[in-house]
Every structure is written in C-alpha cells, then in structure tokens.
Amino acid sequence: MRIITILPILSRQKSPSRLGVLCYNGRMDTATRRGGVFLTPLHFAEKAYEYLESTLGKDWYQSGDYRLWDMAAGTGHLEHFLPKDALKYCYLSTLEQKDVEHLRQKFPSATVFQYNYLDDDVAELFKKSGGHFRMSGWRKPPGESEPNRPKPGGLRPPLMQNDLANPQIKWIILVNPPYATAQEAGLKGASKSGVSDTKIRKQMHAEHLGEVSRELYVQFLYRIMHEFQHRETLLGLFSPLKYLISTNYQKFRDNVFHAAFQSGFVFSSDNFGGTSKTSHFPVAFILWEMPASPSPARAQDLAQGKRYSAPPWDSEPPPDVQPPRQGQENRVRDDDILLPLQGGNNCNGIANPEHCPGLGLMPLTGRILYEDTVVQKKREPIEIQLDILDTAAQKIGIKTVKPENRNDFLSRWIKRPRATVIFPPFGSALTIKSDNVDTRNRIAEDFLASLMCPGNELQNQQQTAFLSGPQASAGALSVTPDNFEQAVIVFAARRVPKDTWLNHVDQLLRPNRELSPQFIGDCAVWSLFDNKNQTVALRNVEYQNRVYQIVNHFFPFPMEEVMKAGNAAQRSDRINRHENSFVADWLTKQTLSVEAQAVLTITREIYRLFFTNWDVLPRAEFGIETDDAGWYQIRQTLLHAKLGADLLSDLKHRHDQLRETILPQLYNYGIVN
C-alpha cells in the first residue's frame, strides 16, 4: 500500500551520507486511489530501514554483493533514507511514467524504470526455463544509448538482467505494494471491480488459490515468492497481516509462502492519510528471509528422486514423525520443503532447478523433508513477535502473531446442524426479507434462533447477532438445544473483546480445554442482554403463502413471573405460550457468577416495568403482541417511551462488569489472542 501522508518537504537529514531531498508533493488522482496506492509515511519508512540495518549491518552495500529492488517504488518514500552510496545498487520500478521521472530526479544514481510487476514478463517467469527468469527486452529511457539495449522485446534494464542471472548476487526486496481489493460482482464499490485483473491473478487462479488473488499485495507476494525462491533474498514487506492469519489464506500459506521471520513492527493504518479512522487495521513491516536452495549435487539427486539414508535417530522416530508409506519412503515431491542438516548452497548450474525446493525455514503447515533423510512430519505453526509502534513510530509493546490452521478456528468448533425446514428469513430483528437473489430461508429441526456469524476475525464483530429466523444472507447457522452453549460462547467471543486496529484481523480459536459451566452461563447471560440479541416474538407472519407464528425461545424468565407482572388477566389472550422458553428453563439449572446474577436482577426489574406499563407502551411500533417479546423489542419500546432510563443505565454498567469478568477467561481458554 502506498500510504498517504503528503509531506511537501522534509525538514531534517539523518546525516551527511543520507539523502536530503524534497518529498513528492502531488495529489493522487482517481486511478491512483482506485489502485489502493498511498505514500509511506517517512517516519515509518525510516523505522523500516533501521530494522533492515539491524539485520544486515549498516555497511551492507559496501561489499557490492547486494542488490535492492522496490518494484512498487511510487515516489520513493521507502528509499528516502538509503545511504547515497547504496543507490547504485538499487533498482526502482513503478507503474506510472510521472513517478519514473520523479524517481530519476530524486535518485539519480539508482536504476529507475517503468514496469508493471503484475503483468510484465509473467508468462516468461512461469516457463521456468533453466531455472532463471527469462526476460524479453525493456522500455529504453529517453536518451539511452543504443548499445545498452537488451535483447528485443525486453522490459527490464540489461544491468538488472545480468544481476538476476548472477547466482552470487544477494537480493533485498523492499516494497510497499498497493492494498486494493477487487470488489465481487454485485457488491457496492464497483470502482474497484477490475483493479486486480492481472496476469498474476490468472496464474493464481490456475493454482486454485481462491479469492486471495483479489488482493493486489498478495499478487505481489505471490510473484516475489516464485521469482526469488532460489535466490538468497531478504524480503522487507509492508502489508496487512491477513496473509499470515486470515481464513482464506490457508492454501496460500501452505502452498506458496515459505520464509523465515527475522524482525518487524506493526502500526495502525490510520497513520496513512486518506484511510478511514473508523475501519482501521494493522499494517506490518516484516523482514523475511527467503532461503537459498540445496547444493547442486543434492539438487541433482532430488531431481532424480534419489532415496536417502535411514533417519538420524537410533530406533523409533520421534512421536511427531509419521513413517512414510511403503514404496515411497524417500521419494521427493516437487512441493516438499527441504531442511538441511548442515545448510546448503545456491542452486547453481542445475538443469532443472524447479526440482530444488526452497529451504523451509518458516514452515507453516504440511510436510518437512530433511536433506539427509526424507520423512513425513507434522509442522507446527510458529509464533512471531512484532514491535507495536504508535503514531510517532515509537515502540509501545509487542504483538504475537501465530499463523493458525483453519481447522482450529472457532467457526469450525461450533456444530452446524443441517437446515431443511422452510421458515421466514430475517434481514434484521423485525424485518422479513424475501427479495434476496440467494435467500437463505431454511432452519434446522428444534430451531431456537439463528446465529449470524460470518468470518472468524474480530473485524466481523458488528456482523454478529441472534435472530428469530434464518438470516436472509449467507453467514449464519441454526441454534438448537444441541449447540446452544457453543452458540453463546461464539457470540460472546465475537462481541466481548473491543475491536481495535491491533486485533482487527485476529482469528478466534477453539477452546484449548474444557470450559467451566460458570463461564458458559456467564457468556449466555451476557449474550442474552447484548444489543445484538435481536430475537423477537411476532404473530401472523406471511411468507410464501403460509402464516407463521414466531416464538421467542430466548425469553429469559419463567412464565410464572410474567403472569405476576402487571395485570395478567387483561393480557390473557396475548400470552403466546404457557410453558417456559428453552432459555428460561436452561438458566434455572446454571451456576452463575456474582456479575451474571447482578445482570439478571436488574433485568427482572426492567421486565417488570415493561409489563406493568403494558397498556401505555407503543408496542405496535415494535411488533409486540405477545408476552414472550424479545429483549430487542422490550428495550426499544422502553427507549421510545423514555421509560426506565435509570434501570437501563444500571444494566449497562452491570453488563460491562460482566464483560470484564468474561474477557480474561476468553484469553485464558485461548479463544482470543
């Protein structure tokens, strides 16, 4: 993402050897915004270079062994703090010609050229001819002398071609690619509908990587991983964290992304001008080591599928190692990740380097192969720790990020009963919605409510609710007596933690051990009186030529208490049921915390107030015709009548206290990171 903080001038210089130049002072046009391009704030660019120097040393460029490439250089903010003497080893490419001209003026010693990293030379890259990226000629800059032209049709400078062909060269990829995501057909925001239609996306589709191909920065990462998988490379990447932890990226992590974490930091996207302050998310700068390939001799053996010696243990293998199937003990697959026992060299001179798997120093999931023995082994996800930076780029803490397998997600933990019974679909608490193109209008047997719970990240907090019928759109499940306790845990886990920029894309995980009955009860009480419990009771709902009675199975108190509240005789024809609701019976059997009991105490007073004023309340506005009205209906009616404000305020206070009781337990059970 080119992050936007338009700084017209830099007022200070690091040292005489640092660049002191004017920042690009220009407004972004519509096409630039559409592509998700923003300018990197200089203080975060400076911090990134500090991390780079900490890894490679301050004099990394003096040996002449390194080349740095920023293939989304834009106006050069990332390179602003590079030493002047390092620029002759730098390649800066960008999409727009106006940026090329600016970069040549700003960095005269660097090699600057116009290049579309997501379209140019893509077909040649995936030919994998001889293990080297074959390029056809390049766009000659104005005034370039004819002898410097490469072979016909080329798109990159000949000097760069030579460096890419030189196995002794080490590469630094320093990049902040665009973060734009193409909108799916039919959704709002059509201005980005074609932003990610590139040749790289087509290649990702060919590898069945799914909808992650809509993300431009992931397309950059995909090509980088392929293009530099056999070169000694340090990747410095600004990007969202989704490629490491989000559900849809599981296959990308398994099949594409293998690198070793070095260091990094994370900060809020609202540090970038032009981004939303209300929908901020974490942006990370991470240094990844993309390891070199095995030795030439070993690579030749791998290409021939050579069998290797016995495992390096005396008798039985370790418990996490599975014996290979008979006849395939030491055969090497193309997608295997090789871990050497004593390191390895570059894949020089190999006829088929595509058979040289990269050294998987950061295995996320799948199979590890040791260079001197080929075995199957379960790979455990690693944890990485990123420094948390504030708006001044100062460290204020540490965030732990752990790539998780989607099978461990909380969304996979809850039982999802089969929905077979047609029922009116809800668009909101009181709205029946039947005009969707793909309407979800079925519920499970023994239906109690619908839990709206799309996705598995905390960013979906506002897309969490209980409804009294199936949610009209995708992303919900039927709550039944069999999964009710799981449902209130999922609801509380998605709603109790505050959604911040730091945890915005964190995954919720299945509990790491058995949950205590009191914790389950507390989550149920908190969920029942959260504003997103939108279960209701409605009469005579017409849907598809049938009339339905919507019963509120989440009514929290026994009907005996309802009958005693107010003048029950006058409401006798409006009592929808004489038996207790499922939730009312369930609550009588629970052991609750003091905080949960306090919530029930104050809500009893609120319900008593509601039924006492039954005849004068504007019930019709909220569809209330029966005594089993939902919490949403009761609360909205009292608010509309400006009645019980002190009780509702007291409830909010006690509800927040219960939240504080539940939150540390969500951490303790490993549900929330």
Image (cartoon, rainbow, N blue to C red):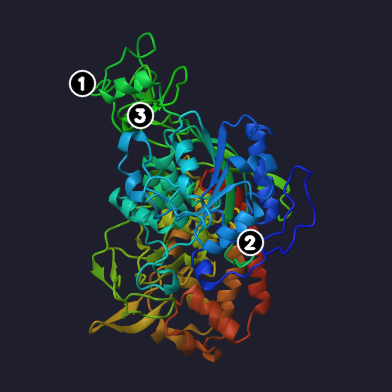
Marks 1,3: beta carbons within 8 A: no
Residue at horizontal 34 percent and vertical 54 percent from the top: 210
- Disc 3 crowd, CA 10 A, few/some/many (<14, 14-19, 20+): many
Q: Distance between the Cα atoms at labels 3 and 2?
A: 40 Å
Q: Distance between the Cα atoms at labels 1 and 2?
A: 56 Å
Q: Is residue 371 above or below residue 261?
A: above
Q: Distance between the Cα atoms at labels 1 and 3?
A: 24 Å
The label on residue 230 is none
Of the residues under marks 1 and 3, which one precedes in the sequence? 1
Of the residues under marks 1 and 2, which one precedes in the sequence? 2
Residue 358 or residue 252, whichever sits in front: 358
Residue 526 or residue 171, whichever sits in front: 171
Q: Position of residue 395 (x, y in %)?
A: 71, 46
- Outermost residue, top side: 314
Secondary structure of the residue carrying numbered label 2? loop
- Disc 2 crowd, CA 10 A, few/some/many (<14, 14-19, 20+): many
Of the residues under marks 3 and 2, which one precedes in the sequence? 2
Q: Nearer the viewer, mark 1 or mark 3?
A: 3
Q: Is residue 559 above or below residue 460?
A: below
Q: Nearer the viewer, mark 1 or mark 2?
A: 2
Residue type at the position of mark 1: Gln
User: What residue does disc 2 label?
Assistant: 272
Residue type at the position of mark 2: Phe
User: What residue does disc 1 label?
Assistant: 326
User: How many labels, in total?
Assistant: 3
Q: Position of residue 338 (x, y in %)?
A: 39, 26
Q: Is residue 161 above or below residue 655?
A: above
Write down the quadrant of residue 345 in the picture: top left
Residue type at the position of mark 3: Cys
Secondary structure of the residue carrying numbered label 3? loop
